[in-house]
Amino acid sequence: MCIRDSSKIISDERDRGDRKKEEFKIELKKRIEAINASTSELSKDTNDPFLLDIDSDAFEVLERIEVLRRRCDDVNELARQCNQIQSVLDLDISSFDALDDVRSEIATRTELWNSLKEFRKRLDRWKRGKAVSYTTLTRPT
């Protein structure tokens, strides 16, 4: 094998690697579009008026929020994988700010409904004359 043949082999391998990288870029673009579409749907579902209605059943709301949280975790994992591939291929890392916003909204709603559920439970105990740890909920004498 001569040097010219070696150069041809190296050149062919480099071209093949470049083609593979382009295929990965195309696949990444499709995945990122799917992540953004899923994030948009999650955002819409997170802003369902039922999740903010004080008259909604807290247990049902928390169940729906948990489903949203799991869906968000799945989308977040896909985003993490895309960023990892981008890092390996030395590409610009995509930012998924809308996904971060959805995660924050889900966490806020979870905290809100857990607090409301706990407040209602303690208020009920207070009304029945049982001791409650809230100093602001003392029974009038």
Image: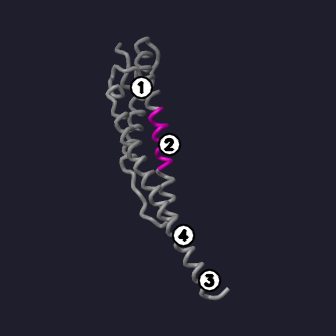
User: Residue 6's mark?
Assistant: 3
* Residue at the disc numbered 4: 16
Amino acid type of disc 3? Ser
Upstream in sequence: badge 3 or badge 1: 3
Upstream in sequence: badge 4 or badge 3: 3
- Residue at 50% in and 47% down: 77
Q: CA distance from mark 4 to mark 3?
A: 15 Å
Quarter of the image for the N terminus: give it: bottom right
Place of residue 104 in the rendered image (x, y in percent of width and height, measured from the top left): 39, 42
Of badges 3 and 1, the one in the foreground is 3
Place of residue 60 in the rendered image (x, y in percent of width and height, measured from the top left): 44, 23
Q: Is residue 69 magenta?
A: yes
How dense is the environment of label 2, judged by Cα within 10 Å: few (below 14), some, or many (20 and up)? Answer: some
Q: Nearer the viewer, residue 8 or 114?
A: 8
Residue segment shown in magenta: 67-78
* Residue at the disc numbered 2: 74
- Residue at 40% in and 13% down: 127
Place of residue 74 in the rendered image (x, y in percent of width and height, measured from the top left): 50, 42
**What secondary structure is found at the residue carrying circle 1?**
helix
Looking at this rendering, what residue extends furthest in the right direction?
1
Q: Nearer the viewer, residue 67 or 82?
A: 82
* Cβ atoms at labels 1 and 2 below 8 Å apart: no
Amino acid type of disc 4? Arg
How dense is the environment of label 4, judged by Cα within 10 Å: few (below 14), some, or many (20 and up)? Answer: few
Looking at this rendering, what residue extends furthest in the top direction?
128
- Residue at 50% in and 65% down: 21
Of badges 1 and 2, the one in the foreground is 2
How dense is the environment of label 1, judged by Cα within 10 Å: few (below 14), some, or many (20 and up)? Answer: some
* Residue at the disc numbered 1: 61
